[in-house]
Image: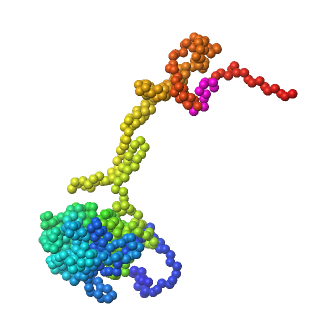
């Protein structure tokens, strides 16, 4: 019942009348909508389990800055199980522990050792500036008193940036108010050690760190962004920043999120929380003077973003316009959209272990789990922000559903295959997929004979080929093969008719000589003697000739070719008296 944007007409209820589908414009279409799998009645910041043995666990910490209808001010850390086998949308609670402060950020790491910490370790950035380290296995076991491993009191403001290193799970990066940044080594969680990534002078004075992110490819590279709009990339080996940048067109931009491309080490995404400048900017550190691409689709500031670890062509973003979009950041288009929430989604994350599954946390008091594989088709026109682009629907198959390799046989023993070569050495460009055509030989002897026959057919010298085969059959002592190849040699000769007549010992008048001394009547003995001596027609050759004659519809005895001049017509039948 709200009036259109830009209209001053008062709100009034619309009369009930049949609804008609909206007409989609030629350039924009509504993206597909994901369906909800699970839901929890919590206002919590979230973290997925990174353990390969327990990938379906989700931690929720009571978020700071939100309060429910009962004005409950307590805080807790809870672990839920994503039970996809259950038909209901409820998620069973595995365990919980009460905390003294609320959470700004939550991170789940693999831990220093799977033997001592089978579920990994949980770290919470608290609103009072402390970092609390928990053992999830103790929480699941119900031993809440022993769940807290350590408390780190190094920051002086809310810890909004918190993330474990993807390659060295014992390293935890954190950022808070007044540009405070620390690297915590949790090799011994009960006695952590600390150091700074470098001097604070690169950040604007008093800038609050809003997010930190480890590079997925180079484990000693760390990025941080702040509410001042500046993003800094740190090199922990050099212990100093290597590059810093901000949007040259908007010096007052307020950044909320920074995340790295999981496949390209030099690309990262920065989100703006500014309502006047709500966009996602893709930067490439090879040219950090301007962003490579702007993703425009939100109408208000962006609060959270997450790049899919399984497919760098999928990116999630949630904004103050109560919308959560799934982007193709490589093309700058919207693939799908989550159902609109009643309030802001302040947290959105991909599961690091289960492809296509993602979670959202909203200020309306609900945590929701969605699946990218359950997307309904577009139903009506979609209107994005200025310059927004969208795809008709999420029809592009994600990378985890694509075949990494494949092969198919063709005629002649040919095999076509495709795939990606093995990973190159460090620093080399990533390999490109290739298609290979090869020949598979299982019986070399058969292939050699087939090639010899094909060569004879191509050259037209079949007669010589049959002669060689006849000689080989005679040398092997195979009378049947000798007879067959001999007959084929006769039929493939240049003058096949004359050769066949000589082979069958037929005279010029088409009469075969008898086995007697004088032969048939009417044939001179001299004519018979004039015929050249032909090889004796053995039983196998005669049978082969008979089969050929029957196939041609001829009489193998030669009676069909006998002259009919001396034939006496049959006498007419006598009439009955």
State the residue lying farthest toward the bottom.
70
Above or below, 70 relative to 369: below
Judge whether residue 28 is colored magenta: no
> Residue drawn at (43%, 33%), measured in percent from left and top?
453
> Residue drawn at (36%, 62%), measured in percent from left and top?
398
Picture coordinates of residue 377 (x, y %)?
44, 69
- Report the quarter where the C terminus lies: top right
State the residue lying farthest toward the top.
526
Q: Nearer the viewer, residue 309 or 54?
A: 54
> Residue drawn at (61%, 24%), measured in percent from left and top?
558
Report if residue 226 is visible in the image.
no
Q: Quadrant of residue 357?
A: bottom left
> Residue drawn at (27%, 75%), measured in percent from left and top?
140
Judge whether residue 556 is colored magenta: yes
Q: What are the residue bounds of the magenta stretch?
A: 551-560
Q: Nearer the viewer, residue 76 or 213?
A: 76
Picture coordinates of residue 48 (x, y %)?
29, 71
Q: Is residue 509 left or right of residue 437?
A: right
Picture coordinates of residue 122 (x, y %)?
23, 73
Picture coordinates of residue 83 (x, y %)?
36, 72
Q: Nearer the viewer, residue 322 or 464?
A: 464
Report if residue 87 is visible in the image.
yes
Above or below, 81 relative to 452: below
Q: Is residue 271 left or right of residue 16?
A: left
């Amino acid at each position: 019942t709200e009036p259109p944007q830009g209209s001053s007409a008062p709100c009034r209820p619309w009369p009930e009348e049949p609804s008609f589908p909206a007409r989609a414009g030629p350039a924009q279409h509504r993206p597909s909508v994901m369906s909800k799998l699970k839901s929890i009645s919590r206002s919590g910041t979230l973290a997925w389990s990174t353990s390969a043995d327990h990938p379906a666990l989700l931690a929720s910490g009571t978020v700071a800055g939100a309060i429910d209808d009962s004005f409950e001010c307590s805080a807790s850390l809870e672990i839920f199980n994503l039970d996809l086998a259950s038909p209901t949308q409820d998620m069973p609670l595995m365990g919980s522990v009460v905390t003294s402060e609320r959470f700004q950020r939550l991170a789940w790491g693999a831990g220093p050792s799977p033997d001592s910490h089978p579920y990994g370790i949980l770290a919470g950035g608290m609103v009072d500036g402390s970092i609390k380290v928990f053992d999830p296995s103790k929480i699941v076991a119900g031993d809440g008193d022993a769940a807290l491993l350590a408390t780190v009191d190094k920051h002086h403001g809310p810890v909004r940036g918190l993330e474990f290193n993807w390659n060295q799970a014992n390293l935890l990066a954190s950022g808070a108010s007044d540009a405070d940044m620390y690297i915590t080594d949790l090799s011994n969680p009960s006695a952590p050690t600390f150091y700074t990534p470098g001097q604070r002078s690169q950040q604007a004075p008093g800038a609050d760190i809003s997010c930190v992110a480890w590079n997925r490819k180079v484990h000693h590279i760390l990025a941080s962004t702040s509410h001042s709009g500046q993003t800094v990339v740190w090199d922990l080996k050099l212990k100093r920043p290597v590059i810093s940048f901000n949007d040259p067109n908007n010096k007052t931009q307020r950044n909320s999120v920074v995340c790295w491309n999981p496949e390209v080490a030099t690309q990262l995404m920065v989100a703006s929380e500014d309502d006047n400048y709500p966009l996602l900017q893709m930067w490439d550190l090879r040219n950090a003077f301007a962003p490579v691409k702007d993703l425009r689709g939100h109408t208000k500031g962006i609060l959270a973003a997450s790049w899919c670890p399984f497919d760098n062509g999928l990116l999630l973003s949630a904004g103050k316009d109560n919308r959560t979009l799934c982007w193709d950041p490589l093309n700058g288009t919207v693939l799908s959209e989550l159902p609109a929430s009643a309030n802001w989604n302040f947290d959105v994350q991909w599961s690091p272990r289960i492809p296509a599954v993602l979670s959202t946390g909203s200020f309306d008091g609900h945590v929701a789990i969605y699946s990218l594989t359950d997307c309904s088709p577009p139903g009506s026109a979609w209107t994005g922000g200025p310059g927004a682009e969208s795809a008709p629907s999420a029809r592009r198959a994600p990378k985890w559903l694509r075949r990494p390799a494949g092969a198919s046989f063709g005629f002649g023993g040919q095999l076509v295959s495709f795939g990606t070569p093995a990973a190159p050495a460090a620093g080399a460009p990533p390999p490109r997929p290739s298609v290979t055509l090869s020949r598979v030989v299982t019986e070399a002897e058969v292939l050699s004979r087939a090639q010899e026959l094909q060569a004879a057919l191509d050259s037209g010298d079949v007669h010589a080929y049959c002669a060689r085969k006849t000689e080989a059959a005679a040398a092997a002592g195979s009378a049947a093969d000798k007879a067959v190849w001999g007959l084929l040699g006769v039929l493939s000769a240049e003058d096949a008719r004359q050769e066949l007549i000589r082979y069958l010992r037929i005279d010029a008048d088409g009469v075969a000589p008898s086995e007697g001394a004088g032969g048939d009547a009417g044939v001179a003995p001299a004519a018979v003697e004039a015929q050249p001596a032909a090889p004796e027609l053995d039983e196998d050759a005669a049978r082969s000739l008979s089969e050929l004659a029957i196939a041609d519809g001829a009489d193998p005895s030669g009676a069909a070719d006998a002259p009919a001049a001396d034939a006496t017509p049959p006498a007419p039948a006598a009439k009955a008296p």
